[in-house]
């Protein structure tokens, strides 16, 4: 939701009639940061929350929506350039219309729960369960199995990270060698 707010702020800075090119450039950079953030977050959230059977389809659908949005924006640019006399409205209308889908996305995000994977990492399992059942509109066995997998994956990654650090410590200890009185001694090459 923060990405949508940043994007909208950038668009507003571009469209306001300040007659200042630096203000337009600043708005362009700010909206680019917001759009870049949203472009990274939306597919990740979709992939985390979708069942594995349709995860690829959901990712492809998101990409198709991006492409459709670009196509619609080009047609709007074309329509404005043909239908309006030359004025600043020819670029302000297409740029300002970017607020419509961004605002709709931002308002839609208010209803979405946190990612189940993120909630499971924070050990908020009950909320993760509610998040999965809400987003999938299913509280059956499938969602329970997915929740158990997410919990198991989180625990496995955590244990592996801890185990790797122990292995690394043991390897460094074996290279150095510990004498019977507790002093470190460098291992000699044979």
Image: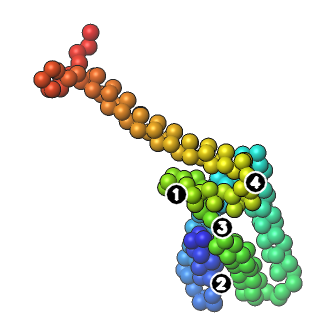
Marks 3/1: CA distance? 17 Å
Marks 3/4: CA distance? 16 Å
SS for dot 2 = helix
Mark 2 Cα within 10 Å, few/some/many (few <14, many 20+)? many
N-terminal-most mark, 3 or 2: 2
Mark 1 Cα within 10 Å, few/some/many (few <14, many 20+)? few
Q: Which residue is mark 1?
A: 124
Looking at the image, which residue is at 41% across and 34% down?
163
Marks 4/2: CA distance? 33 Å
Mark 3 Cα within 10 Å, few/some/many (few <14, many 20+)? few
Q: Is 79 situated above or below 162?
A: below
| Residue 44 as seen in the image, left or right of residue 140 | left
Q: Is 162 situated above or below 3?
A: above
Looking at the image, which residue is at 62% across and 56% down?
129
Q: Depth check: 127 or 122 in front?
A: 127
Circles 3 and 2, Cβ within 8 Å, touching? The answer is: no
Circles 3 and 4, Cβ within 8 Å, touching? The answer is: no
N-terminal-most mark, 3 or 1: 3
Identify the mark at residue 142; answer none if there is no mark. Answer: none
Q: Which residue is mark 3?
A: 112
N-terminal-most mark, 1 or 4: 4
Q: Nearer the viewer, mark 3 or mark 4?
A: 3
Q: Can residue 46 be seen?
A: no
Marks 3/2: CA distance? 30 Å
Identify the mark at residue 58; answer none if there is no mark. Answer: 4
Looking at the image, which residue is at 61% across and 45% down?
148
SS for dot 4 = helix
Quarter of the picture holding the C terminus: top left
SS for dot 3 = loop
Identify the mark at residue 15; answer none if there is no mark. Answer: 2
N-terminal-most mark, 3 or 4: 4
């Amino acid at each position: 939701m923060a990405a949508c707010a940043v994007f909208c702020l950038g668009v507003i800075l571009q469209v306001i009639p300040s007659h200042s090119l630096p203000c337009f450039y600043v708005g362009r950079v700010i909206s680019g940061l917001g759009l870049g953030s949203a472009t990274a977050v939306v597919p990740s959230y979709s992939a985390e929350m979708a069942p594995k059977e349709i995860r690829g389809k959901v990712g492809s659908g998101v990409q198709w929506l991006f492409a459709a949005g670009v196509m619609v924006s080009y047609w709007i640019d074309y329509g404005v350039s043909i239908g309006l006399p030359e004025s600043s409205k020819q670029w302000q209308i297409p740029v300002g219309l970017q607020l419509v889908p961004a605002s709709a996305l931002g308002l839609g995000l208010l209803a979405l729960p946190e990612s189940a994977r993120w909630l499971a990492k924070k050990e908020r399992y009950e909320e993760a369960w509610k998040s999965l059942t809400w987003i999938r509109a299913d509280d059956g066995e499938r969602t329970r199995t997915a929740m158990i997998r997410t919990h198991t994956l989180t625990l496995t990654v955590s244990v592996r990270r801890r185990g790797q650090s122990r292995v690394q410590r043991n390897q460094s200890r074996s290279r150095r060698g510990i004498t019977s009185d507790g002093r470190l001694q460098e291992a000699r090459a044979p």
